[in-house]
Amino acid sequence: MGEELKQRILPNVADGSLKLCFALTEPNAGTNSFRIETLAKKDAAKGFYRINGQKVFITGADVADKMLLVTRTTTLKECQEQGRSKTYGLSLFLVDTRAEGVTLTELQARGIEGFREFTIYLEDVQVPAEDLVGEENGGAAALFSSLNPERIVATGFAVGNTEYWLKRAIEYARERVVFSGKPIGSHQAIAHPLAELKIELEAVRMLARRAAWSFDQGHDPARVGFWANCAKHKAGDLVVNAVDQAIQTFGCYGFADEYGIIQLWESARLLRTAPVTREMILNFVSEHVLNLPRSY
């Protein structure tokens, strides 16, 4: 990002007067981001790019002022014909979400509490050349570096949710009495799973801090990626186990709307899949950390 663009955008992002969303995923390009087809072509004479394409599962597009849009400025086919790497040709743009040619269609998705998700259609959207982020065709490095903090943030979200559900389960286990006049938390069948959740929670918290520290230190993205992926992998499993154990502790009351537990299952389950699946994390560790042959 050039200095002029930084000065124009970042202070407003920091003070909350400018809201951004991230537009990467497409119907035919989910985990494999290199297959994106949204294309930006430069009109040098007029000083703008013309963008056409489609994005899907874009969270918060309705409240964002601009989207950080990932496009191709050189198609994958052109890269192959030119003998270039598939990482070449990706570019990043800041695009007004209300620009002419941008259409938002809400997806009826669940699990994103407090947010809405959208399919975004871009038809001949004109974007000023000064809103190109970084170098044309050179956006891959910035793009994949940005995915590491996204995974760290997702881990933090899972940690916070786990703390909440664990607290609710512990409070209920201290108060609920069924047999022998003792609270159910006095029974190991209830207490031990909650104790294990606490241990796992602290382990995930430490992983998240290790990943955040590595990112803040400016370490190589691959190194940061290892810690960020480890944290996200453990956090996704932990948060699902936490809400499941909260439901189990509450018994049938865990399914009653008034207790506010069962409604949280969907958002917990989402964290096993988004923003990256546990299978792709295992692929990353296998290939880039253990140096095993690529499996896909």
Image: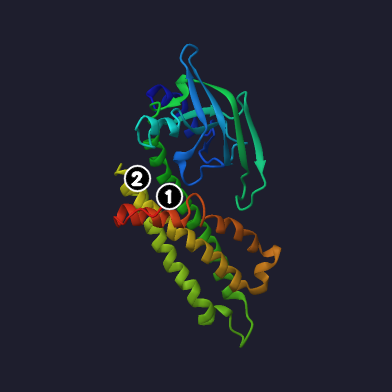
| Residue at which label 2 appears | 215
Residue 8 percent location from the top left of the image: 46, 24
Q: CA distance from mark 1 to mark 2?
A: 9 Å
Number of other residues with Cα within 10 Å of mark 1, as a class: few under 14, some 14 to 19, many 20 or more: many
Asked which secondary structure carries label 1, the reply is helix
Q: Position of residue 49 (x, y in %)?
A: 50, 21
Residue in view at x 31 percent, y 57 percent: 292
Q: Which of 292/95 is in front? A: 292
Question: In the rendered view, would you say 68 is above or below 108?
Answer: above
Element type where label 2 sits in the image:
helix
Q: Nearer the viewer, residue 172 or 271?
A: 271
Mark 1 and mark 2 residues within 8 Å of each other at the beta carbon? yes
Image height check: is 47 above or below 163?
A: above
Residue 214 visible in rendering? no
Mark 1 or mark 2, earlier in chain: 1
Question: Residue 257, can we see it?
Answer: yes
The residue under the point 48% across, 47% down is 31
Kind of residue sitting beneath label 1: Ile
State the image coordinates of residue 92 (x, y, percent, origin top left). 45, 31
Specify the amino acid type for callout 2.
Answer: Phe
Q: Is residue 158 left or right of residue 124?
A: left
Task: Say which residue label 1 marks.
Answer: 152
In this rendering, position of residue 28 left or right of residue 224: right
Point out which mark residue 181 bears: none
Residue 80, horizontal then vertical, whole percent: 39, 34
Residue 84 placement: quadrant: top left
**For residue 264, side relative to residue 43 (left or right):** right
